[in-house]
Image (cartoon, helix red, strand yellow):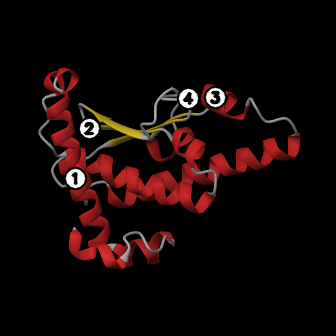
């Protein structure tokens, strides 16, 4: 894969072709390319801001992959050693509106960065569904607690508001 923005790996060539393949007119194609650029910039901004703040023991490396996971609903994954993969095409498939795409990308990045410092037995995770569910449940809670505790920072820095409904603060 070619070297990307800020030293992060970005796989755009095949991914962009797959993502844009169904588009017919040039104006839509240009709009999609601009959207892809905006999303890549947003992912890098969020990742660079939180990498090392959420995962305080191990720094992570970002890989933005537009071609991967198209048959899956995983918008991100973390693998050993500390590689965070984000699949923006999966999020855009479900949230074509830019605001909601960014909202979900931010949540996904925070979630994946919580995995970086977790001790995970990847061999067991592949075969033990209950173990995988326990790992995900812990990170889900950590993700939404982090978002709730940093809501003002997220609103001011990234312009994303109402991340956690105020009536659900105490249920976290």
Neighbor class of circle 4 (other Cα within 10 Å; few <14, some 14-19, many 20+) is some
Please report whichever mark, 4 or 1, sits nearer to the chain's N-terminal start. Answer: 1
Please report whichever mark, 2 or 1, sits nearer to the chain's N-terminal start. Answer: 1
As measured in the structure, the alpha-carbon distance from the residue carrying label 4 to the one carrying label 1 is 26 Å
Tell me, yes or no, whether the two marked residues, 4 and 1, touch with CB atoms within 8 Å: no
As measured in the structure, the alpha-carbon distance from the residue carrying label 3 to the one carrying label 2 is 24 Å
**For discs 4 and 1, the disc positioned in front in the rendered view:** 4
Tell me, yes or no, whether the two marked residues, 3 and 4, touch with CB atoms within 8 Å: no
- Name the quadrant of the C terminus: bottom left
Kindly identify which residue carries mark 4.
67
Where is residue 38 shown, x and y percent of the image? 62, 54
Where is residue 3 shown, x and y percent of the image? 51, 34
As measured in the structure, the alpha-carbon distance from the residue carrying label 3 to the one carrying label 4 is 9 Å
Q: Horizontal placement of 68 versus 20: left or right?
A: left
Tell me, yes or no, whether the two marked residues, 2 and 1, touch with CB atoms within 8 Å: yes
Q: Horizontal placement of 147 versus 123: left or right?
A: right
Q: Which of 157 and 90 is in front in this view?
A: 90
**For discs 4 and 2, the disc positioned in front in the rendered view:** 4
Kindly identify which residue carries mark 3.
13
Helix, strand, or loop for circle 1? loop
Residue drawn at 29 percent across, 44 percent down: 60
As measured in the structure, the alpha-carbon distance from the residue carrying label 4 to the one carrying label 2 is 20 Å
As measured in the structure, the alpha-carbon distance from the residue carrying label 2 to the one carrying label 1 is 10 Å
């Amino acid at each position: 894969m070619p070297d990307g923005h800020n030293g992060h790996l970005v796989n755009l060539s095949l991914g962009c072709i797959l993502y844009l393949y169904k588009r017919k007119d040039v104006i839509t194609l240009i709009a999609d390319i601009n959207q892809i650029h905006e999303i890549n910039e947003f992912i890098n901004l969020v990742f660079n801001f939180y990498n090392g703040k959420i995962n305080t023991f191990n720094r992570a490396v970002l890989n933005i992959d537009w071609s991967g996971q198209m048959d899956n609903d995983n918008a991100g994954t973390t693998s050993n050693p500390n590689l965070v993969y984000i699949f923006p095409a999966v999020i855009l498939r479900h949230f074509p509106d830019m605001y909601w795409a960014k909202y979900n990308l931010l949540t996904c990045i925070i979630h994946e960065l919580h995995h970086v410092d977790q001790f995970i037995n990847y061999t067991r995770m592949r075969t033990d569904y209950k173990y995988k569910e326990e790992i995900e449940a812990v990170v889900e809670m950590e993700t939404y607690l982090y978002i709730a505790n940093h809501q003002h920072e997220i609103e001011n820095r990234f312009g994303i508001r109402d991340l956690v409904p105020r009536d659900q603060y105490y249920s976290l």
